[in-house]
Image (tube, rainbow, N blue to C red):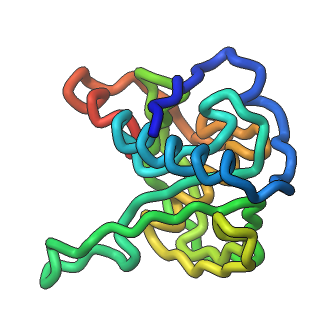
Amino acid sequence: MTLRKIVTLPEPVLRRKAKPVTKFDKDLQTLIDDMVETMREAPGVGLAAPQIGLSERLIVVEYYEKEEDEENEEAPKKVWAVLNPEIVKASEEKILGVEGCLSIPNLVGEVERHVEVQIKGLNRHGKPMKIKARGWLARIFQHEIDHLNGILFPDRATRVWQPPQEVEEEKEF
C-alpha cells in the first residue's frame, strides 16, 4: 500500500463533479487500500477520491457502525468503501455540528446536516450496497459525498473559524 498526497484548496479537482467508477479491477482495489491507509495516516474518518487528486466517485469511511454508547466504549470501527454513492433518503431532522477537512487545513466550521441518511452505491467489487447511517456516521457520509459533487464544508457552514492549535491537530472531525 502507498500513502497518497492529499490535495488542498485551491486545487481545481476539489471543485469538480467526479466521474462515476465503471472499472472494477486490481488497480481499483489498490486505490481503495491506498485511500484507507492515507485516511488513517492523516488522520481522518473519511476520504474522497478528489482529495487525492482523482475525479472519481469513490469514498472511504472508517467509524463506529453504531453510535458510540457508554456501555460499549471499545466498539470496533468499520471501514466502508463506497463507489458511486448517492443519498437516497434523508431525515427531515437536521443538527449543527463542527466539521473540518483534510483538504482545508487550519479551518473548521459549523455545518447543518441530516441526522439520518440512507446511501446506495457499489462495494469495492461492484456489488450493490445500501447503508443506513445516523449521527456522526451520517455526517461523515454527507461530507464525503459532498466532495464528489465539488462541495466543501465552508460552502454549507453557518460559520467558519481557525481552531486553537491543539484542536487543529485532530484534522477532521
Answer above or below: position of 1 versus 146. Answer: above
Number of residue marks? 0
Task: State which quadrant residue 19 falls in.
Answer: top right
Corner quadrant of residue 91: bottom right
What is the residue that sits farthest to the front in this orientation?
26
Q: Residue at x 48, y 44 (%)?
A: 110
Q: Position of residue 31 (x, y in %)?
A: 60, 44
Which of 16 and 129 lies nearest the eye of the viewer?
A: 129
Question: In the image, 29: left or right of 40?
Answer: right
Establish if 106 lies above or below 35.
above
x and y percentages locating residue 55 in the rendered image: 78, 36
Residue under the point 13% across and 84% down: 71
Could you say where residue 14 lies in the image, as x and y percent from the top left?
71, 29
Q: Is residue 167 something that shows in the picture? A: yes
Residue at 22% of width from left, 79% of height from top? 69
Seen at 68% across and 15% down, the residue is 10
Image location of residue 143, percent across then percent down: 59, 51
Task: Left or right? Give the position of 130 relative to 2.
Answer: right
Find the residue positioned furthest to the bottom.
71
Mark yes or no: residue 143 visible. no
Left or right of residue 151: residue 170: left
Give the quadrant of the N terminus: top left
